């Protein structure tokens, strides 16, 4: 003890938290300056985790107060630095709650306000970000008489303009394949994917969870095996839901409602690779190749759930992926092994009685908060759980009845059910008999309405939203499930009871709460629907719902609510497919065609062309195979004629967009025959519209005359959307024939029709066409305005690749105006999207334009290298390679080009590039022949108006 206080003697192993905190912050900031964001965040967060309240709590005096302020400020700046790193690593959504709380405590700290604005913006909450700025401005003015800082005002302006730079270089990006240009490849800063943690705590199986995680780290293919209801999916989800996961991406694909032909498509869609559009001269996309390209250079886990019914499709796909992607790990859940040589089997055993008892108690307490497992009740719980073989599903189903029955009563009532099953199913595995007994008993305890709703919902393979379930109609006599019953009655109380009894579970969906059932329960409920003789009526209600839903929502796609309806249709695609397949099995392929053709615009707008082609062609094959469809004595009715016409129209267009031009031609011929033979007057109006389009694509007739005839037939009718499509294609036809004035006029008619149809997507493409016409006529400011409006529409629709082509157009204008920084930012965003969707055309279009930017900065060596990469890339579409080759020829690859080589380059490019774009070539080549400097050549490349058609022309 010293005079006036104490001195503590510390050993080498002792630590002072203040010193540790300061060291962690200092080292974290050093790593941040070095660009090592992951290490920086680890160090900053480890230091911040030491805080347990206010610094130097309960100590008073000037010395302590000064030190307290210093430490508080250091902590606050460390929190700001940690938030900065988190934003750089792409965790905007996770940081919103933390930054909101910090800003509430420190409302005048503009750095925190700016970080929260950025986090909100990157999470898609743009209005909230702007409102946050407004509230800060009012607060500063009212309290301090100050205006926001220039930095905060600049951030607000950037948000208003949707500046691509706001998304930041640290936003997580998919690693592109080596076949993409180097400029389109980037690293990753956090785990991306679609895995969502299951609600509620995970109970028991701690040893199994630890062992599974170790196995996933050690092996490249891990298959969780076990019977239905044993908890494979929940265990896999928990094992993969690690906040400290070292992988770059983690994707979960539920195959429960997928057929063998849809496994690859399901994977591609999950990865965001469903867009199949290609340039006219490009081969159809190989989806397996795109998936491999997306995964091959990344540390990724892909989890396939419910594989048992699609093993023949999953096994070869998994083997191919593992062979081609050395950093990939695959996790699967199945009742049977995949049968691959290096597969690690992880058998999911039932819970121990103690673990199952813990689960029972937790579930029972949720059902009946007064439930308490005292010593006697606990013994009853353990006895019951042993009887249930530790199957989690059986335990949860049994626990659902504690509100009315004691544990002992539940056990006694199950006795009879077990006895019946032992007598009737002696050959079935014991665990299967146990689960069947619990399901039988739970089903018997349901009310009549609950039984009917549960069994009928089993037809909804993708689950159901409340509104859609209510609109299906009454499932049977005596139920309260009536159409239009509303949210306060009808189905909602029944669905709530079924959730409480563990027969259904609720999950958030695009349209609100969605009700789903485990596959084991669904199989059981379908069986009850059959044995109780209610299958036929239930199926009829289900297909009626599917037909009505497809017709209603496909029509609603032509509205300002297009994005919402796209999401709704996407959420119901599994159910719509099930309805279509059911119609085919019932011999009603014509109705199935009506359903599928109604979705044609959805497949195109949402970038799911391959899925649309598959669904339409399969249904058409079924229709062609039905007896009587080719019988001239049985002509199709008006609805069937409409379905056939649009089936052929969409199959022709989607195949063309996907690069399958031979297939498209075959469907075009059938389309022509179908509409010309039809007696439906509406088909007579629509028929010439798409005949003109297909003639433009094949160049086999006088297209101008066809467009004029189609316009004469459709003008003044209610088919405004189809007229917008006609005028857009007429505009494109005129532009490619060197008539920008006529192109602009027809695009304007298309804009008017699209606005009358209230269709944002049609409006965007017509605005783009008019912008193309204006730019080709040298009116660039008008083109910028039109392209910007189209870009904003597509951005709000999350049409990423289509938005990217508009961004390239705007970047081209930026270059012409000398705003190279803005052009750079736009091209960087395009490269990011190209890498995410593995779009070779988009990637190489961006690479060509980036080379122009480099040349404009007088970085000719780098520009030449970038162009050579495109010109020599096998994966690049021919017209992108031609543009790169032309640019190299024009620039003479650093020296004057000789006339013969220039002529060869001119001829090759002219044979490939679209007619309008060729107008740009003579001006560029003349400069080379006259010995103009490289700077002059680049300036001409920047300012020759039609060159945008060469640089940014898009597929589809």
Image: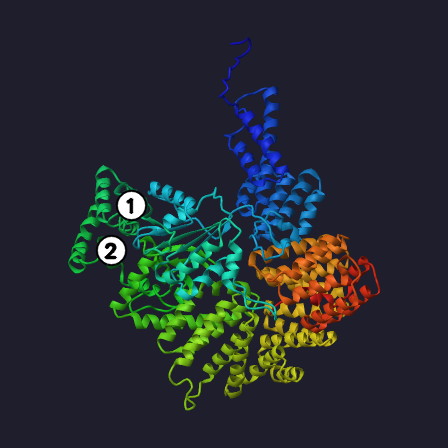
Q: Specify the color scheme.
A: rainbow
Q: Residues within 10 Å of mark 1 (few under 14, many from 20)?
A: many
Q: Residues within 10 Å of mark 2 (few under 14, many from 20)?
A: some
Seen at 60% across and 82% down, the residue is: 714
The disc, 1 or 2, on the residue closer to the chain's N-terminal end is 1
* Quadrant hosting residue 559: bottom right
Q: Helix, strand or loop at disc 1?
A: loop
Placement of 547 over or under 458, stated as above or below: below
Query: What is the x, y in percent for residue 738?
Result: 73, 75
Seen at 21% across and 48% down, the residue is: 387
In the picture provided, is 928 more to the left or to the right than 421? Answer: right
Query: What is the x, y in percent for residue 941?
Result: 76, 62
Is residue 924 something that shows in the picture? yes
In the picture provided, is 145 more to the left or to the right than 331? Answer: right
Out of 510 and 172, give the one closest to the viewer.
Answer: 172
* Quadrant hosting residue 758: bottom right
Quarter of the figure with the C terminus: bottom right
Query: What is the x, y in percent for residue 385?
Result: 24, 46
Placement of 631 over or under 772, stated as above or below: below
Placement of 178 over or under 728, stated as above or below: above
In the picture provided, is 821 more to the left or to the right than 684? Answer: right
Residues at marks 1 and 2, CA–CA distance in whole angstroms: 15 Å
Residue denoted by label 1: 351
Q: Helix, strand or loop at disc 2?
A: helix
Query: What is the x, y in percent for residue 853?
Result: 73, 56
Out of 565 and 729, give the one closest to the viewer.
Answer: 729
Q: Residue furthest top?
A: 3
Confirm or deny contact between disc 1 and disc 2 (CB under 8 A).
no
Is residue 773 something that shows in the picture? no
Residue denoted by label 2: 432
């Amino acid at each position: 003890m010293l005079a006036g206080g104490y001195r503590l003697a510390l050993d080498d192993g002792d630590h002072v938290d203040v010193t540790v905190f300061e060291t962690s912050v200092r080292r974290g900031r050093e790593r941040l300056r070095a660009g090592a964001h992951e290490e920086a965040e680890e160090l900053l967060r480890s230091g911040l985790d030491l805080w347990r309240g206010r610094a130097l709590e309960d100590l008073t005096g000037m010395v302590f107060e000064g030190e307290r302020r210093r430490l508080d400020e250091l902590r606050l700046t460390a929190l700001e630095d940690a938030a900065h790193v988190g934003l750089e690593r792409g965790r905007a959504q996770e940081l919103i709650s933390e930054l909101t709380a910090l800003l509430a405590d420190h409302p005048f700290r503009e750095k925190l306000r700016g970080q929260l604005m950025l986090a909100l913006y990157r999470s898609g909450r743009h209005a909230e970000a702007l409102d946050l700025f407004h509230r800060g401005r009012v607060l500063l003015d009212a309290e301090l008489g100050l205006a926001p800082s220039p930095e905060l005002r600049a951030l607000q302006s950037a948000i208003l303009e949707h500046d691509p730079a706001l998304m930041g270089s640290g936003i997580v990006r998919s690693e592109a394949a080596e076949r993409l240009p180097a400029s389109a490849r980037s690293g990753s800063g956090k785990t991306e994917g679609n895995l969502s943690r299951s609600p509620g705590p995970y109970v028991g199986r701690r040893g199994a969870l630890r062992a599974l995680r170790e196995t996933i780290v050690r092996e490249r293919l891990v298959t969780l095996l076990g019977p239905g209801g044993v908890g494979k999916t929940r265990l896999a989800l928990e094992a993969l839901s690690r906040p400290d996961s070292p992988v770059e991406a983690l994707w979960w694909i539920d195959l429960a409602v997928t057929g063998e032909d849809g496994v690859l498509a399901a994977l591609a869609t999950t990865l965001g690779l469903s867009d199949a559009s290609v340039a006219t001269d490009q081969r159809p996309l190989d989806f397996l190749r795109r998936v491999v390209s997306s995964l091959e250079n990344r540390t990724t886990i892909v989890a396939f759930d419910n594989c048992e019914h699609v093993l023949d499709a999953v096994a070869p796909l998994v083997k191919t992926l593992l062979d081609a992607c050395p950093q990939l790990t695959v996790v699967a859940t199945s009742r049977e092994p995949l049968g691959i040589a290096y597969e690690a089997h992880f058998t999911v055993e039932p819970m121990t009685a103690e673990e199952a008892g813990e689960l029972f108690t937790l579930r029972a307490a949720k059902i009946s908060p007064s439930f308490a497992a005292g010593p006697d009740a606990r013994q009853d719980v353990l006895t019951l759980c042993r009887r249930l073989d530790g199957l989690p599903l059986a335990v949860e189903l049994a626990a659902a009845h504690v509100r009315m029955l004691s544990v002992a009563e539940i056990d006694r009532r199950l006795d009879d059910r077990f006895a019946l099953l032992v007598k009737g199913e002696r050959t079935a595995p014991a665990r299967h008999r146990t689960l069947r007994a619990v399901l039988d008993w739970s089903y018997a305890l349901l009310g009549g309405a609950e039984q009917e709703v549960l069994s009928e919902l089993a037809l909804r393979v993708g689950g159901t939203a409340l509104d859609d379930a209510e609109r299906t109609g009454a499932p049977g006599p005596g139920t309260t499930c009536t159409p239009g019953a509303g949210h306060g009655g009808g189905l909602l109380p029944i669905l709530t009871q079924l959730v409480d009894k563990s027969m259904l579970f609720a999950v958030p969906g695009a349209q609100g709460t969605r009700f789903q059932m485990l596959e084991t329960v669904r199989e059981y409920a379908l069986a009850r629907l059959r044995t109780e003789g209610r299958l036929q009526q239930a199926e009829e209600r289900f297909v009626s719902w599917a037909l009505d839903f497809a017709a209603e929502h496909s029509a609603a796609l032509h509205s300002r609510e297009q994005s919402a309806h796209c999401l709704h249709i996407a959420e119901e695609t599994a159910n719509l497919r099930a309805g279509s397949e059911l119609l085919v099995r019932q011999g009603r392929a014509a109705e199935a065609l009506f359903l599928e053709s109604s979705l044609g615009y959805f497949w195109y707008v949402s970038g799911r062309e391959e899925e649309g082609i598959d669904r339409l062609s399969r249904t058409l094959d079924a229709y062609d195979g039905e007896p009587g469809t080719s019988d001239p004595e049985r002509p199709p009715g008006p609805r069937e004629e409409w379905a056939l016409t649009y089936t052929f129209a969409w199959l022709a267009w989607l195949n063309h967009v996907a690069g399958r031009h031979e297939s498209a031609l075959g469907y075009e011929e059938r389309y022509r025959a179908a509409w010309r033979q039809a007696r439906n007057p509406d088909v007579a109006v629509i028929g010439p519209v798409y005949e003109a389009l297909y003639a433009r694509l094949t160049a086999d007739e006088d297209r101008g005359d066809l467009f004029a005839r189609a316009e004469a037939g459709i003008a003044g009718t209610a088919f405004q959307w189809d007229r917008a499509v006609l005028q857009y294609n007429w505009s494109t036809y005129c532009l490619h024939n060197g008539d920008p004035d006529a192109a602009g006029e027809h695009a304007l008619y298309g804009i008017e029709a699209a606005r009358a149809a209230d269709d944002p997507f049609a409006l965007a493409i017509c605005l783009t066409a008019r912008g193309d016409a204006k730019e080709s006529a040298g009116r660039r400011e008008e083109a910028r305005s039109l392209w910007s409006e189209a870009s904003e529409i597509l951005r709000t629709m999350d049409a990423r690749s289509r938005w990217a082509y508009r961004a390239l157009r705007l970047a081209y204008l930026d270059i012409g105006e000398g705003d190279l920084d803005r052009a750079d930012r736009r091209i960087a965003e395009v490269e990011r999207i190209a890498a995410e969707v593995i779009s070779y055309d988009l990637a190489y279009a961006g690479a060509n334009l980036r080379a122009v930017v480099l040349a404009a900065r007088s970085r000719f060596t780098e520009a030449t290298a970038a162009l050579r990469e495109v010109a020599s890339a096998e994966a690049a579409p021919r017209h992108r390679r031609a543009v790169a080759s032309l640019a190299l020829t024009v620039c003479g690859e650093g020296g004057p080009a000789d006339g013969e080589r220039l002529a060869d380059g001119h001829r090759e490019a002219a044979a490939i590039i679209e007619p309008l774009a060729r107008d740009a070539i003579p001006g560029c080549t003349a400069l080379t022949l006259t010995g103009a400097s490289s700077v002059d050549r680049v300036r001409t490349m920047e300012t020759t108006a039609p060159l945008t058609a060469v640089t940014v022309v898009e597929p589809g």
